[in-house]
Image (cartoon, rainbow, N blue to C red):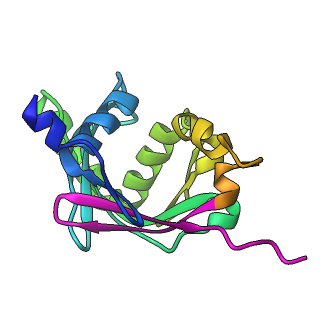
Amino acid sequence: MIRSWQQRPTLHRDGVSLQEDWLLRKLQQALNGDALQIDGLSLLSRDSTLHLTSQQPLAARLTLHFDFLPIDWDSRQIRLRYHVQGEAISPSTTRRLLGGLLLGVMEGAFGHKALQQLAKPLDWLNLEQDVAIIDLTRLPALQQWLDYPLLGKPLAARLTIKAIETSPGLLRIRLGRSPAPAD
C-alpha cells in the first residue's frame, strides 16, 4: 500500500510528475490485448524507450525509442519523435530466422508499418514516419478534464500544457495559464 501511494502522480506548483511504474501500469491497462503487449517502459532524460510485443503482422519484440517535441496546445496535440527497432520472435527456429531476415532488411519500414497497424484502432494516435501525434481532444480518458467547466469556460481554455519532459523514472508535465484572447 505504501509503494502504490509513493507511485501516484505528484502535484507541483507548475504541473505534475508521473512515476515510470505508475505510467507503465496505466499503459498496460489501456493498450494490452491479443495483438499487443506493453512489456516495459524506461524514462530517461533523452531517448526513453517503450518495449512492446506485437503479434501482428509478424510476431516481434519492438523497442520504441522516443523523445517529446514542443507542445502544440492550440491544436491540443502532443508530438513525439520516435524510431523503432524490432526482433522477430517465434517458437519455430525457421520462422524466427525468416522473420529476423525480414526485420533486418526492412527494420525501419517494418517497425513503422507494424506500429501503424497496431495504432489503427486508436483514433487519437497518428503515426507519421518518425513523429507520433497524440490528439488530446480524441483521447477518451482526458476528454472530461479538457471540457470540465471552470468559471464559465472549459478547463482547456484556461490551462495549457507548456512542456512534457522526461528524466530518469519520471514524466514531468508542466502546466501554465492560457493567454487571454486578444480583443
Is any part of residue 123 visible from this angle?
Answer: no
Q: Residue at x 38, y 32 (%)?
A: 31
Q: Quadrant of residue 74?
A: bottom right
- Left or right: 179, with 141 as reference point: right
Residue 2 horizontal/vertical position (percent): 8, 34
Which residue occupies the extreme front position in the image?
151
Residue 34 horizontal/vertical position (percent): 35, 22
Which residue occupies the extreme bottom position in the image?
182
Residue nearest the viewer, comparing 62 with 135: 135
The stretch drawn in magenta includes residue 176: yes
Q: Residue at x 33, y 62 (%)?
A: 172
Residue 76 horizontal/vertical position (percent): 64, 58
Residue 126 horizontal/vertical position (percent): 57, 51
- Left or right: 81, with 135 as reference point: left
Is the residue 55 above or below the residue 68 in the image? above
The C terminus sits in image quarter: bottom right
- Left or right: 95, with 81 as reference point: left
The dominant secondary structure in magenta is: strand
The N terminus sits in image quarter: top left
Residue nearest the viewer, comparing 133 with 158: 158
Residue nearest the viewer, comparing 132 with 130: 132
Which residue occupies the extreme right position in the image?
183
Q: Quadrant of residue 29?
A: top left
Is the residue 68 above or below the residue 157 in the image? below
The stretch drawn in magenta includes residue 111: no
For the record, the magenta segment spans 159-183
Residue nearest the viewer, comparing 104 with 61: 61
Q: Residue at x 63, y 41 (%)?
A: 138
Is any part of residue 8 visible from this angle?
Answer: yes
